[in-house]
Image (cartoon, rainbow, N blue to C red):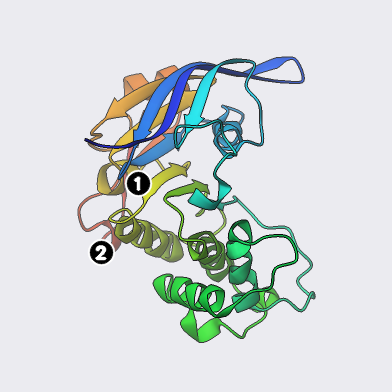
Amino acid sequence: MTREIVRCDRLGVELGGVTVLRDLSFSVDEGDFLAIVGPNGGGKTTLLRVLLGLQKPVEGRVLVFGAVPGRFPEKIGYVPQRLFFDRDFPLGVREAVLMGRMALKTPFQHYNKADRAAADEALGIVGLSALGNRRIGALSGGELQRVLIARALAGKPELLLLDEPTASVDPEMRTSIYDLLDQLKKSITIVLVTHDTGTVSRFVGRVLCLNCSMVMRENPEGAPGGDTARQIYPYTVDLLVHHPHAHDRPESNVKS
C-alpha cells in the first residue's frame, strides 16, 4: 500500500484579509512527482509555506507525514525560488550545503564526519563536487540553484519541495536541472512549483493548476490544455510542448 505523504482537505488561506487559497483538496503519495503551475499571485508559494508549517490555514485540514505541518522538518528538503545574500560574504559551497543538515542537529551541536560525508554526497548528486571549495558568491545562477538543491538533499529528506528552481537560469541549465529532478524522482517524493508548463509531459506524474482554487490533472500528456489554461490563467498564455528529446531540438509553441 502506498504511503500518503501530504493530505490537504478543503484548505483555505488568507493573507491580510485576502483569500489566497480556497477549498483545496489533494494528496501526495510516496514516489509522486507533482507540479504546481499557475499565474503569479495564484497561491503556489503560499501552498509550499503551508506544507512547511510557515503559514497557518484559516480553514480545512493539512497533514504532512500524518502530522501537522512543521512537525517533521528533518523529513523535508526545501529549495527556495531565490537566495538573497551578500556575494562578498566568505561562505564556501560545501559550508552552504552543510546547512541542510541543521534540522538533524541539536542547538550548538557541531557538524561531524557523517554531516560532511552527506554534504559531499549531495554535491556529487548535483554535479558540483569540483566546486566544493569555491565561494558561493562566485557561482553562476545555475550553479547556485544546484547548490540550493544539494543543500536540500544533504539532510536526506523524504519530501523535496522546490519553488521555481529554474526561474533565473538559462535554457541549457533549466534542462539540466529538470534532468536532475527526473533522476531524483526515483528515490524521493517531489513537489515542484513552476511556470514552465512544458515540464508536464516529460517529467511529472500529476499537475495541480492553481489560481486560488485548483484543477488537478492526472497523468498529464503535454502542457495543460487550452480549457484548463483558461480556467487558471487570467490572460492568454503560450503553452510549451516538450517532445521526448526536447533538448535536441527547439521547443514548439502552441497558443492557448
Query: Going 30% across and 60% down the picture, which residue do you hit?
Result: 183
Q: Residues within 10 Å of mark 1 (few under 14, many from 20)?
A: some
Query: Going 28% across and 40% down the picture, which residue do you hit?
Result: 205
Q: Residue under circle 2?
A: 248
CA–CA distance between discs 1 and 2? 15 Å
The label shown at residue 199 is 1
Quadrant hosting residue 180: bottom left
Quadrant hosting residue 69: top right
Q: Is 100 drawn above or below residue 57 in the view shown?
A: below
Residue 230 horizontal side relative to residue 99, left or right: left
Q: Callout 1, which amino acid?
A: Thr
| Position in image of residue 135 (x %, y %) | 67, 80
Quadrant hosting residue 40: top right
Residue 106 horizontal side relative to residue 31, left or right: right
Relative depth, front residue between 106 and 42: 106
Q: Callout 2, which amino acid?
A: Asp
| Position in image of residue 223 (x %, y %) | 31, 36
